[in-house]
Image (cartoon, helix red, strand yellow):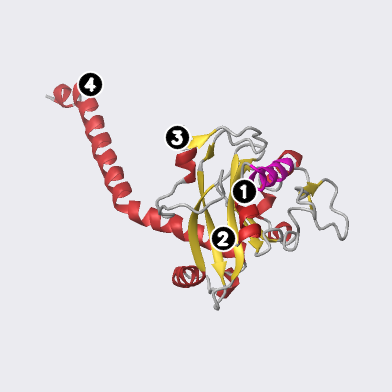
Amino acid sequence: MSSNKESFGRTIGFVLAVCIVCAALVSIAASGLKDKQVENKLLDQQTKILEASGLLGMTDGTSFSIKETYGKFVEAKMIDLDSGEFIDGDPLLFDERRNSRDATKSEKPENDIAGINRRSHDAVIYIVRNGAGVVETVVFPIVGSGLWDLMYGFVGMEADLNTVKNLIYTADFKETPGLGAEVLNPKWKALWPGKKIYDESGALKIKLVKGGAKAGDIHGVDALSGATLTSNGVTRTLHFWFGKEGYLPFITKYREGGLI
């Protein structure tokens, strides 16, 4: 009698039954939490955009105040990167990472100094106005290789589209804690406000300086100590995205014609 109950077949059947039940529970939980995950991802993105634009300090950090401030001052708009023109489209449905994996919606850069492999044809930028409706900041998403992986972030620029207001990286990367991951350090982030991307001739000059930028260097920011490759990656990322294959066509049109 006991030999039948402890047979190999019954053991395997029991294990499979437990696996099926557990898999079903995990699947149900993941499905049930999907909307919450999307909501949290959007809230995190809005938080980073407010931080890049200098408005995060206006909130009390709650999800309600972040959504309210974002909705009051920030307008997301889609642009064609090649022409720099605004285009129709729903920014909420746009997914730069997904587009970059789709050969029909992306292209290989001619000079891929950011190490991104493919660049989406389109992008979403975030226009931030004050209470009177005047543009004060434009926030540009960026992505580029660090030491171990792609690093995503946002650059908030003042209305002259040259002066950096803030550079904010998201934390979903594989950079080394204490080294490349220092891009998240508030002390390093505090070095960016007021730096200029271009010089007076329009040449790209922003860079991270190994050993530290000299006092008064409006284009230089201290490199990350012990993280040369990540520092080089940050410089190359900025040069790519504010160059001709990135936002330069839009920036040129904005300066010339006041597209906003």
Residue wearing tag 4:
8
CA–CA distance between discs 2 and 4? 73 Å
Q: How crowded is mark 1: few (under 14 residues within 10 Å), some or many (20 or more)?
A: some
Question: Foreground mark, 2 or 4?
Answer: 2
CA–CA distance between discs 1 and 3? 23 Å
Q: Which amino acid does label 1 sit on?
A: Pro
Q: What residue type is labelled 3?
A: Asp
Please tell me whether residue 99 is drawn above or below residue 32 in the rendered image. Answer: above
Please tell me whether residue 154 is drawn above or below residue 233 in the rendered image. Answer: below
Residue wearing tag 3:
102
Q: In which quadrant will I find the N terminus?
A: top left
Give the magenta range. 232-244
CA–CA distance between discs 3 and 4? 48 Å
Residue wearing tag 1:
249
Residue 251: x %, y % from top left: 63, 54
Question: Foreground mark, 3 or 2?
Answer: 2
Residue wearing tag 2:
259
Residue at 53% from the left image edge and 51% from the top image edge: 85
Picture quadrant of residue 144: top right
CA–CA distance between discs 2 and 1? 12 Å
CA–CA distance between discs 3 and 2? 29 Å
Residue at 85% from the left image edge and 48% from the top image edge: 211
Q: What residue type is labelled 4?
A: Phe
